[in-house]
Image (cartoon, rainbow, N blue to C red):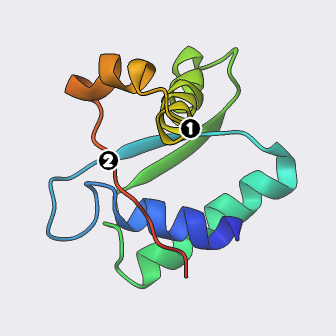
Amino acid sequence: MWVAYVDEALRDLPGAPGRAFTCWAVFESRGTVGDARDREIVQAMRVRQAIRPGFRADHAGPLGEPLLWLPDAVAGAVRASYDGDPSYLDVMRPRVELHVVDLD
């Protein structure tokens, strides 16, 4: 499931062919094995030309990259909205663009 999620998420990044170019993404480190799996997915996407060759992917922990908490805050706001409390997402809406990824 994680592989499908990362594959879909990376494919939809602005760095995908035909879109504005994103040159760098920082993923939250998930340990040696998880980070290696992420790098394999990024490389496979380069081979398939699903992302541009110059796309750079690094890993960091929350102490090394404080903005890694931001996706958790957005995910919490989206979850709260689905659960009937849109107030958190409403505050973010001017700066957040939601994309629903169907994994079926």
Amino acid marked by disc 2? Cys
Q: Secondary structure at mark 1?
A: loop
Q: Quadrant of the C terminus?
A: bottom right
Q: Is residue 104 left or right of residue 102?
A: right
Q: Quadrant of residue 43?
A: bottom right
In percent of the image, x 79 and y 55: which residue is there? 34
Judging by the rendered image, the residue that carries numbered circle 1 is 83
How far across and how far down the image is residue 7, in percent?
Answer: 52, 70
Mark 1 packing: few (<14 Cα in 10 Å), some, or many (20+)? few
In this rendering, the count of numbered labels is 2
Q: Which mark is residue 23?
A: 2
Vertical arrangement, residue 70 with respect to residue 42, above or below = above
Mark 2 packing: few (<14 Cα in 10 Å), some, or many (20+)? some
Q: Secondary structure at mark 2?
A: loop
Q: Which mark is residue 74?
A: none
How far across and how far down the image is residue 57, in percent?
Answer: 51, 49
Q: Is residue 46 left or right of residue 97?
A: right
Amino acid marked by disc 1? Asp
Q: Is residue 2 left or right of residue 14?
A: right
How far across and how far down the image is residue 25, in percent?
Answer: 45, 43
Residue 42, visible in the rendered structure = no
In percent of the image, x 40 and y 19: which residue is there? 87
In percent of the image, x 40 and y 59: which residue is there? 100
| Distance of label 2 from label 1 (alpha carbons) | 35 Å
Residue 87, visible in the rendered structure = yes
Vertical arrangement, residue 93 with respect to residue 2, above or below = above
Q: Of circles 2 and 1, which is in front?
A: 1
